[in-house]
Amino acid sequence: MNRFLFIMALAMLVLYGCNQMDMSSGDSILIVDLNVVAKATGRQELMQKELEFANLQLSEQLKLVASRLEDSVTEEKEKLGNKPTDEELKEFQTLVLQAQQQLQNTKNLAIQQSTEFRSELIQRFRSEISEIAQQIAIQKGGSLVMLAGQETLWFDSDADITDEVIAVMRKRSNDYTPTSEPASHNEPADGNGEAG
């Protein structure tokens, strides 16, 4: 039993020692808060406007596809006349179901494109922050930059480089080029894999 306790204590010491960073050698963890950077640099508002503009474009394109489908269904209905046969009615109902499915597919594609565009905006922002944070971390002798967030329980304010990242981004603010098209697509597909 004593030998077991001795081995456990030794293992704990080894594990504890392996998890410690030698701060005197310059290895340190630094923290940056992306939300604070986005708000302070006005980037959050710019990205929101870009997303709203892209969603407006997608919405207009979706309306166009819906209008085309409605016109097609109306045209076919007029061709039926006043006394369609059972076969003609069945074909028309199939056409209506196909048009509804095509419209739903187009809506789903528009949602997917909007989500992809939002992800691209965020990734582009994170990449820009990553480059800046890396430069600051190297200057400070840091070995790791982490994001402040719900996973972070506590950190020393000396480890926070958010203000320094903001300062660099403000100096570079003229370099930001907004994107105006969602997910590099001009129009959502019409539900059949074709541009509408």
Image: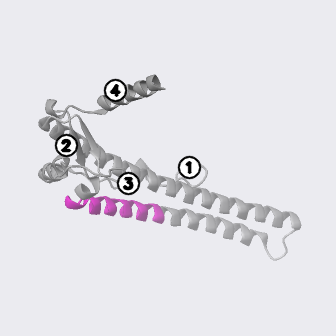
Identify the secondary structure beneath mark 3: loop
Question: CB atoms at circles 4 and 2 under 8 Å apart?
Answer: no
Asked whether the beta carbons under mark 1 and mark 4 sit within 8 Å of each other, the answer is no
Which residue has dot 2 on it? 132
Residue that label 4 marks = 14
Q: Which quadrant of the view contains residue 180?
A: bottom left
Name which residue lies at 77% across and 65% down.
Answer: 93
The foreground one among 104 and 159 is 159
Foreground pick, 37 / 160: 160
Where is mark 1, residue-wise? 194
* Mark 1 vs 2: CB contact within 8 A: no
Give the crowd class for mark 4: few <14, some 14-19, many >=20 residues within 10 Å.
few
Whole-number angstrom distance, CA of label 4 to CA of label 2: 36 Å
Q: Which numbered mark, 1 or 2, is in the foreground of this view?
A: 2
Of the numbered discs 3 and 1, the one sitting upstream in the chain is: 3
Please name the amino acid that badge 4 sits on: Val
Q: Nearer the viewer, mark 3 or mark 1?
A: 3
In the rendering, at what x and y percent does residue 61 appear?
Answer: 48, 62
* Residue occupied by mark 3: 181
Image x and y of residue 49, in percent: 32, 63
**Is residue 196 something that shows in the picture?**
no
**How many angstroms separate mark 3 from mark 1 (CA)?**
18 Å
Estimate the x, y position of residue 83 in percent, counting from the top left: 85, 75
Which of the marked residues, 3 or 2, is nearer the chain's N terminus? 2
